[in-house]
Amino acid sequence: MENLFKIVGKNLNISVKQIEDTVKLLDEGATVPFISRYRKELTGNLDEIQINKILEEVTYLRNLEKRKEEVLRLIEEQGKLTEELKNAILKSEKLQGVEDLYFPYRKKRKTKADTAKEQGLEPLSEEIYKVKSIEELEKVAQNYLNEEVETIEKALEGAKLIVAQNISENSTYREKIREELLKFGIITSKNTKKAGELDVKKVYGDYYEYTEPVNKILSHRILALNRGEKEDILSISLSFNQDKREFIEKFILKDFKNISLKELYLEIIRDGLDRLILPSIEREVRNILTEKAEIEAIAIFKENLKNLLMQPPLKEKNILALDPGYRTGCKTAVIDKEGFYKENTVLYLVKEMHNENQLKSAEKKVIDFIKKYNIDLIVIGNGTASRETESFIADLLKKYKLNVKYLIGNEAGASIYSASKIAGEEFPDLDVTVRGAISIGRRVQDPLAELVKIDPKSIGVGMYQHDVNQKKLDESLEDVIEFVVNNVGINLNRASWALLSHVSGIKKNIAKNIEEYRKENGRFKNRKELLKVKGLGAKAYEQMAGFLVIIDGENILDNTIIHPESYEIAKTILKSVDLSLEEYRDNLFEARKKLENFDYEKFAKENNYGQETIKDIYTALIKERIDPRDELEKPILRSDILTIDNLQNGMELEGTVRNVVKFGAFIDIGLKNDALLHISEISDKFIDDPSKVLSVGQIIKVKIKDIDRERERVTLTKKGL
């Protein structure tokens, strides 16, 4: 174990002591957010990213040790474990190295070489390395003839098959070929015979005659190729050029000492390469490329999701939420500034489809809602019929000179939420279509609280999310949600169980029990009351308490990030400047003025407290609790419609980043379809990764570069801005 900590410490450039203490906390069941915020002295002030990296590295090395033990046991059971092999396995630093060494001993289908061994030809295969000529080999082969091996030709064929298989199972060769294929291999894709009927729109047309060096191919292309292959539209292969192929043959040939038998050896080597080793290594390299591509795709998705969840809430807004539709009309819901649903209706407002009476009725209903509920903002979903709905609302606001703004909201995932169990529990008496409208409106009031109710894969900020390892994706996205939720802090008396379930230390059943307790007993008056919730023990309370806040509770410290375990320290700090907790609560402004001259470093030293902990407590006492989302840019509110006909090349406007991908970003400029800002147009300087300069929700200035009116596509540029 000590050696494991040293390896992790060296890999991450973190001291062994920090690794040991952090892993001990993790093994004891502490969560990453809790350790990061409340155990800074133990970890040496490691942040969540560093702690997650430690967890990742330790898990990998523990799995490596576990696999070594398993492989040693399996080979020993076969009676084939030598001291040399055992040491090689124990010294391996990578899982792939262990698997290479285990490869010859794995259970696999019976091969022709295995049959040759059963026929007693293995000793003859060893002679191939020793003899001086073909004639000598043929002479030796006569000693191995029997009922099953009737001729010299058959004996030699069996011996060559055994040597070819030995080559394919040699860990040194496999490692070298894998390394060379990753560095110098060429990936090629062609359309299959079925492509014509399966890919009518030629979605994969760019890959019908496609070739690229393996070491240059971008992750999104790998995932696109994989998907095309899975759909039986593309055929993929990896290969070497002739020079590299000859280099590989020579690399293996050097272990055959007798130059006079070079042609025989090359025959065997080529058979081993073509029939056994290259197809096997090709699969492995494809897996390596896929894994790398998945890691990159998941990383982009994580970053986009984090930025989406961190979108600033539009607080204190009465909202009229519209989920547009043609035939079935526009589903409409009113949500008050507290997020509570008030009423709903259906509006028939598409001029081309609905009659004059329906349009007038829709107009009257919207005006009545605006007046009755003092509507501040109209939110329109960006799906089917959103342009027609926007046109109707923009005309109405202008016609009646109403002081109300609107915005186009991203409705991705709203339909999935509306049919979910959570939505059914929240609004059991409402139709699914109305639930969808409520979701569209609420996600503007508080994006985080609403979006955590929806499968992250359905909210439109990833690429190829259904093509990557789903278990890894789910785990990664859960980490992101947990990070954002705990970073923001959650109002214990307002949060749904779906939101609570992402708080440090809270499992889904406990989250539901908290919500149930609140229904039966009313608002939580203090954090300690959490211990009365069914199934919630002291350990869970320790992990969650600091991330749940109570506004206007019995104890003002419950509305800070100060952990209950440190309340006595907070009181001591207040006492040192002649303040009681009650005086601090009753006159915050004066109390904070008194605290301005408090020396937290001196206090920590004199009382033998951790300096980082005291700094955090002091900061929480002297400053208002700030929602980190409030400091970010608010969504763009509109009062008039923009159509593709209004645009001209060179026009400058503002847009909101909707999605960031490897090749650029999709920008909402107010049109039905998001416009593309290609990576090459992001800056006058070279940009290798759009996520380094752009993030979901960011509001940016852009310029129209090109307009394809027929396909309703717009491309943008930031160059020269």
Image (cartoon, rainbow, N blue to C red):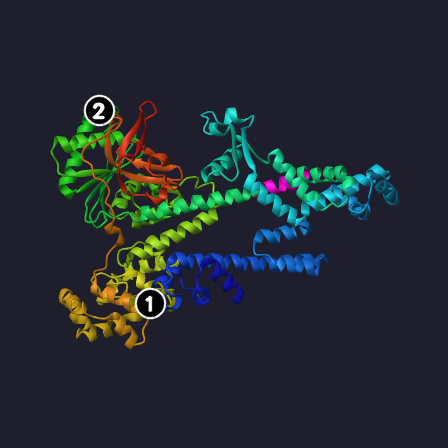
- Residue 370 image offset from top left, x and y in percent: 15, 39
Between 429 and 575, the one nearer to me in the picture: 575
* Residue type at numbered disc 1: Leu
* Residue type at numbered disc 2: Asn
Residue 439 position by quadrant? top left
In primary-sequence order, the first of circles 2 and 1 is 2
The residue tagged with tag 1: helix, strand or loop? helix
In the rendered image, the vertical position of residue 299 relative to residue 221, given as above or below: below
What secondary structure do most residues of the magenta stretch adopt?
helix
Q: Residue furthest left?
A: 401
Q: Is residue 279 magenta?
A: yes
In this view of the protein, can residue 453 be seen by the observer?
A: no
Q: Is residue 80 left or right of residue 528?
A: right
The residue tagged with tag 2: helix, strand or loop? loop
- Residue 669 image offset from top left, x and y in percent: 27, 34
Q: How far apart in space, not on screen, are marks 2 and 1 (Cα)?
A: 60 Å
- Residue 330 image offset from top left, x and y in percent: 26, 34
Q: Is residue 157 left or right of residue 706?
A: right
Q: Residue at x 61, y 54 (%)?
A: 98
Q: Which residue is mark 2?
A: 355
Range of residues picked out in magenta = 275-284
Q: Is residue 371 left or right of residue 87?
A: left
Residue 460 position by quadrant? top left
Q: Nearer the viewer, mark 2 or mark 1?
A: 1
Q: Which residue is mark 1?
A: 531
How many other residues sit within 10 Å of disc 2, few (<14), some (14-19) or many (≥20)?
Answer: few
